[in-house]
Image: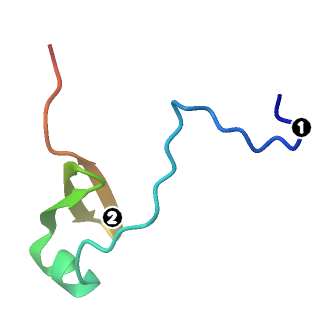
């Protein structure tokens, strides 16, 4: 029994921020790929905002 509420759900993973490149380089290239927490992602810079998504398609 966990009285202090510190027990965590085993399905929930906590991740820390990851540096994937220099801001100027991402803006200049418009996109780049990086490995983040064992997953390959693509980072986009579009209309003043950054977006990231998994590079693999998991469609079945």
Cα–Cα span, label 2 and label 1: 41 Å
Which disc is residue 38 wearing?
none
Q: Give me the residue at 22% from left, 61% from top.
A: 44
Q: Give me the residue at 24% from left, 84% from top.
A: 22
Q: Which residue is mark 1?
A: 3
Residue lying furthest right: 3
Which disc is residue 50 wearing?
2
Q: Give me the residue at 51% from left, 30% from top.
A: 11
- Residue nearest the viewer, comparing 31 with 34: 34
Q: Residues within 10 Å of mark 2 (few under 14, many from 20)?
A: some
Q: Is residue 1 above or below residue 31?
A: above
- The picture places residue 55, in percent across and down from the top left corner, at 15, 44
Q: Give me the residue at 22% from left, 78% from top.
A: 21
Task: Tell us which disc is closer to us: 2 or 1.
Answer: 1
On the rendered structure, is 17 left or right of 52? right
Q: What is the secondary structure assignment of the residue under circle 2?
A: strand
- The picture places residue 15, in percent across and down from the top left corner, at 46, 55
Image quadrant holding the C terminus, namely: top left
- Residue nearest the viewer, comparing 51 with 10: 10
- The picture places residue 40, in percent across and down from the top left corner, at 17, 50
On the rendered structure, is 45 left or right of 14? left
């Amino acid at each position: 029994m966990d009285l202090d509420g510190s027990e965590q759900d085993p399905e929930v993973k906590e991740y820390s921020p990851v540096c994937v490149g220099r801001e100027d380089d991402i803006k200049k290239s418009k996109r780049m790929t990086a490995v983040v927490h064992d997953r390959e992602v693509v980072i986009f810079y579009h209309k003043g905002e950054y977006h990231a998504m998994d590079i693999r398609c998991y469609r079945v």
